[in-house]
Image (cartoon, grey):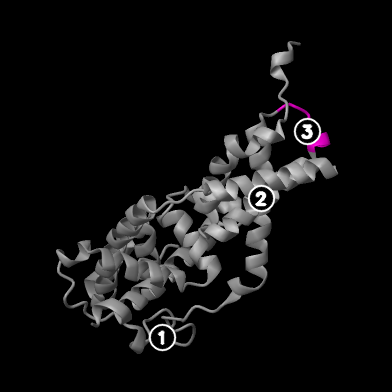
Amino acid sequence: MSETNIHTLNPDNWIDAYADYLFNYTIARVNDADKAKDLVQETFFAGLKSMKNFEGKASERTWLISILKRKIIDHYRKINSNKGKAEVRMNFYSDGEREGDWIEERVPQDWSGDADAEIETEELGEALQSCIAKLPEKYRIVFEMKTIQGFDTEDICNELDITPSNLWVIIHRARTQLRECMEENWFKK
Amino acid sequence: MGKIKITCEEATTICSKAQYGEATLLEKIKLNFHFTYCKVCKVFSKQNSKLSTMCCMVKKQRELSKCCLSEKDKAKLKQQIKELENKL
């Protein structure tokens, strides 16, 4: 066995070598700069405290990422247990003979003034960003991972421990809510 | 899953899935059949596509404003790591 296959830890070098990498990894998943900073910090601290458990089989970076992943999952769990349960407005009848039909007041309205030229404006993007920010946290995370960060369905399901049909229900409810939010705040003006 | 007739809720869910190119062929057939008699869902579908265009804009805006840890943050972190190392 050659010595070169054994990885070592060098904490003095961690910040310069991995801080940006870990931060970008985190921001793609939590999209909150302050929270991401906290998670990165916690990861380095947890790494230091468990240095003796490092066997040198994985690279330093892989090892740190595995700690960070657990921190992110813990963060999701916390969200799930409180804020994530916030209700999303229903758009369809949930029972009776009209089950699955549109509820009248929720029916999409004509988006007048949605000329294609206008759609390029920066303010429109900002309006959508603020609608996204209003989504219940769990919906926001799933929606952003899929739509903005472009993760694969399978990866999101594994990371958040949800089924694909679960994911599509969440994505769809998020999109329905965003459609309504944009209708109220942008297209009605 | 055999029925061709679907509710508006099912139709719009397939519509959202289709925005990511992940609706199955059968789902797309059911959706298009639904559109033949439901104009409301057709409007929804059109707006849902527009939403996808808008999301691309947000994606671009986010990429431009992507931040990383500031030098100040990093210096602070380094300091904290040193302190913790000494304690351990």
Residue at (56% x, 53% y) in the render: A157
Which residue carries the number 1 mark? A98
Q: Quadrant of residue B2?
A: bottom left
* Residue type at numbered disc 2: Gln
Residue at (73% x, 21% y) in the render: A6
Residue A62 at what x, y percent from top left? 64, 35
Q: Chain of mark 2?
A: A
Q: Secondary structure at mark 2?
A: helix
* Residue type at numbered disc 1: Arg
Q: Secondary structure at mark 1?
A: loop
Instruction: Indicate which disc residue A41 carries.
Output: 2
Which residue carries the number 3 mark? A54
Residue closer to the observer: A168 or B63:
B63
User: What segment carries the magenta color?
Assistant: A51-57
Q: Residues within 10 Å of mark 3 (few under 14, many from 20)?
A: some
Residue A173 at what x, y percent from top left? 45, 71
Q: Are marks 2 and 3 in contact (CB under 8 Å)?
A: no
Q: Quadrant of residue A105?
A: bottom left
In the depicted structure, whether residue B76 falls above or below residue B11 = above
In the picture, measured across the screen, residue B57 lies left or right of residue A118, that is right
The residue mark sitting in front, 1 or 2, is: 2
The residue mark sitting in front, 2 or 3, is: 2
Give the mark, 1 or 2, whose residue is nearer the N terminus. 2
Q: Chain of mark 3?
A: A
Residue A17 at what x, y percent from top left? 59, 34
Give the mark, 2 or 3, whose residue is nearer the N terminus. 2
Residue closer to the observer: B41 or A27:
A27
